[in-house]
Amino acid sequence: MTSCKSVRTATLAAILVIGCVTSAYAVPPPAPWVVRNIGPRITPGQVDVDPRGFWTIRASNGDVSQNSDSTLFTHQKLSGDGSILALLFGQEGGDPQLGKSGLMIRADDSAGAANVHLFMTSGRGVGVSYRPFPRHFTFFEGADRRYGTRQFPVWFRLQREGDKFTPFTSTDGFSWSQIHSPMILPGFPEEALVGITASSLYDGIVAAAYGNVTVVNGQTSPNLRVCSGNASALLTWDPVKGAAGYIVRRSAVNVPGFAADTLTPNPIKETSFADTSLPNGQAVRYLVSAVFDAGGQSVEGWTNAVIALPVPTPGNLIGCDIGLEATLMRGGILFDPATGVFRISGSGGDFGNVEDRGFLAFQTVNGDFQITARTLEKTTAKVGVMVRETLNSGSRMAFLGGTTAQGVAFQYRGETDGSTAFTGRPIVSAADYRTPMLVRLVRRGNTISPFVSLNGTDFIPGGTPQTFDPPLPPTLYVGYAISAMNPGVVLNSTFSDLSIGPAPAP
Amino acid sequence: VDVRDVWVLRGHHGNEPLSDDAFFFVYQPLVGDGSVLAFLMGQEGGNREWGKAGVTILEREAVRARAAHLFMPAGHGVTFALRRSETQPLVKEFGNSTFGPRRFPIWLRLQRQGEEFVPFSSTDGYGWTQLRAPVTLRRFSQDALAGLTVASAFGGPVTGSFANAIVTPGLLSPLVRPCMGSQKVLLTWAPVKGAVGYVVRRSAADAFGFTADILTPTPIRDTQFMDLGVPNDIPQRYMVAAVFSQAGTTQEGWATSVTVAPLGLPDGMMGCNLSSEMPQVQGNVTQDLASGSYEITGAGSGFGGVEDHGFFVSRSLEGDGHVTARVLDHATRPGGDGIAGLMIREGLDAGSRMAFLSSDPTNGLLLRFRESPGEPFAPGSIQVLSPTAYQPPIYLRLVRRGDTVAPYISDDGVRFNLAARPRAFTPPLARTLYFGYAIASGQAGTLASGTFSDLAAGP
């Protein structure tokens, strides 16, 4: 045991040797854990585990970024699906902004290995990054309030299901909030490394303490979506591999997850759950978990927790976030009966490419229809009317709307999970984009036709009608949508005169 | 208990207000000294006021068994509860400002050392704050039960969620008393049973315990540690842990955490809490640089009985000496009076022999003595001035000559008059005594304040 400078006051010169330990009699993590300094480091990092199983980690090295990493990585193997989770008691030091420590799932222990990283930073809260391919650039969307503020203790969990990787956090260890949409890393090896990282970003020592470090095979939680409507909430999720059923719980948002009421006394087989007769204007939290059969014994997996806010609107619109990168940046819709104005809010990177990311307030409509709305406010967000086949982010869809930067355009995705395309882009240039503006989509059979009205009375084509092949299903999701064009913010816009009705005769 | 070692306890029991206990208790034996501790992640349900979850040491499995409980109730802050005998009801000590507010998560720990039980809490699991002075349960069974408790208090089901629930024999933590002087902090503690040494750490007050610097590269054998060169008025967090040798291996016990700031006192003087019932409520002294006067604050139920509870600013002097101060006002606390005055004592432990020239509005100026360590004050307090005659400001002085202590008063600080007959101590007083100014609020956990000036202690 030797003395060490405080992490808070350490200087580069003072940390040539990290000779300090938290507990005089702590030991390195036991097998199967392996302590590895990946990439360049200033001094070898140190990991101590005390008799309670508390981990204390110190490192003086670089970062997990760009196309090569420098991090202290204490790991073991995880074969197939599963999670690594831990209770982060605290993290301090290193670069004042981006010194970091957290959980990682990594293809191997080379410096440029593909990885997904969930971490706490010294100055900017929770962060998420991923490198989809070896030696590829690391995507880092920011560590800030979009994923959670800097507060302790906090539970972290990083889940793998096939090639999908999903980060979760929890304040109580029972209700896990998914903080990013699943990140897809194609070709990730079946046998991966899971563990705990620490990177100081070449600035002093970063230190962190963890408890309850756990690696679990399977028991994955569902990828959950929530939609809120008039006195109602609709939960939908993708089937979880190996699940024998699902349990749904509900509580007030400030109640710990362990005290939530069970809504499904027996696990259900369906992958959706509708809750009705809810008080409008009152947020409610749902926890959904999968149940697995493990050698004749029923085992419940980790929950996924979401918050719904039932609100009344004309036409009983239902609001859903679609494909958000930062899933805590929830959107919503409100209606002011006095003015007849809808206020819609949403986050997300964009509607476009292979995935849509934003918020949609919709009705389900069977057969041909016409939807019209008056956009009252142009913003940097993309707003307009939307038609979609499903609520999945890669669904076939058509959208007519605008942004201050791009003007008004008709955009569609003709193939599920395919790229979007524009017709006649833009119909109204950014310079000519004025609000209020009426926007309209008409479905006739498998064809969606866009229209705009610049004078509030007369409609002109808003682009080339798009005929979908294979045919569209009879029922589509039809409504008004917003994307903030930035996954780290929630933006607002307003519209009025929403009408959804039968398509007029051609 | 799930794969992470997270526990969920659900109970639907009584406990309030009957004299018999009714609670759900998950326990294991605790033989002799040790602790039960857990990370309480949340508690919900049960009675809105007294549904609860926490840790317990129980003498035996019986509805009126003697017990110490430390728990978080639904409607109050952290609560310590005690059943001293099987014929007495459970007594609770609580309040948001007493042991901490209701908040989660929080670490709770109950420590037993012999017949003494001490509650601790922690925010980070590394530094443990002693919440209260030890309570004694005489002849408590060596074979006790220690574990986790939930009780609904007849208010519907209650749920508590815990992590890291541990019962550890031994590994006791020291009961650390800090004293603060100018640019220095003195930590003292009673020897811990079985300890082979002690480790002292320090960090900023708001830093995590795991980032603290180790001040004792090798464990020390002393039961005190002086930290020098520490900036005045900037709080520092100290953690002191005992080191044990068990079955050939060395283990560090739970660390006791105290947060204190060095005080801008005259050279040689230090301020110490004398066995405060609530160690986290520290006294303080600040000097008004313009007037040169000092404001002193201190908590504690008072001086007398077998133990003193208050705050004491003093310096040690060998041989004959005096302490003098000009008392500027009556000490007060919220809603009442405090007690303050000059004190000479043999040691800084709570039951030390001492002489106290105390003032308060009800009793005026009194001279009192503890003639034997750990015994109540000697009978017959000497009233130096009646309540009506005692009107601050006034100069007070206590003088030690040999084994005799004599009180003096003065209006001008120049001419001092003997105020009462000197008292001789037998057996003889120690060569070194502590000379200073003391204050107590009369209430544990509540601070009283008073002002004085011209403090001097010397030959």
Image (spheres, helix red, strand yellow):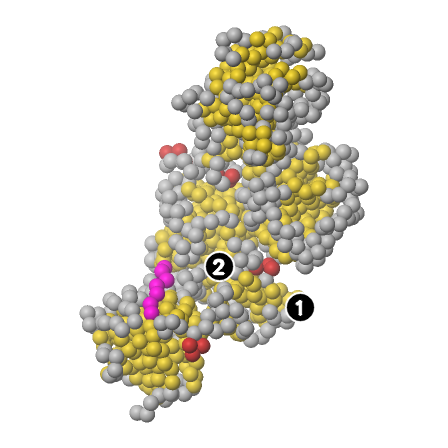
Q: What element carries label 2?
A: strand
Q: In this view, does A365 lie to the left or right of B214?
A: left
Q: Is residue B147 left or right of residue A344?
A: right
Can residue A82 be seen at all in this image of the molecule?
no
Q: Residue at x 59, y 46 (%)?
A: B77
Measured as percent of width and height from the top left, residue B182 is found at 47, 23
Give the image quarter of residue B317: top right
Q: Which residue is drawn at 44% across and 49% down?
A: A150
Measured as percent of width and height from the top left, residue A463 is found at 25, 81
| Rendered view: B392 above or below B93 | above
Few, some or many residues within 10 Å of mark 1 (<14, 14–19, 20+): few
| Rendered view: B156 above or below A502 | above
Residue B195 covered by magenta stretch = no
Pick the residue in front: A278 or B115: A278
| Rendered view: A237 above or below B11 | below
Give the image quarter of residue A245: bottom right
Residue A491 covered by magenta stretch = yes
Q: What element carries label 1?
A: loop
Give the image quarter of residue A491: bottom left
Amino acid type at mark 2: Phe
Measured as percent of width and height from the top left, residue B176 is found at 59, 30
Q: Mark 1 points at which residue?
A: A296
Can residue A204 be seen at all in this image of the molecule?
yes
Q: Mark 2 points at which residue?
A: A168
Q: What stretch is highlighted in magenta?
A: A487-494
Q: Residue at x 48, y 19 (%)?
A: B453
Q: How many labels does the image show?
A: 2
Question: Mark 1 to mark 2: distance in Å?
Answer: 29 Å
Q: Which residue is drawn at 43% across and 52% down?
A: A149
Amino acid type at mark 1: Gly
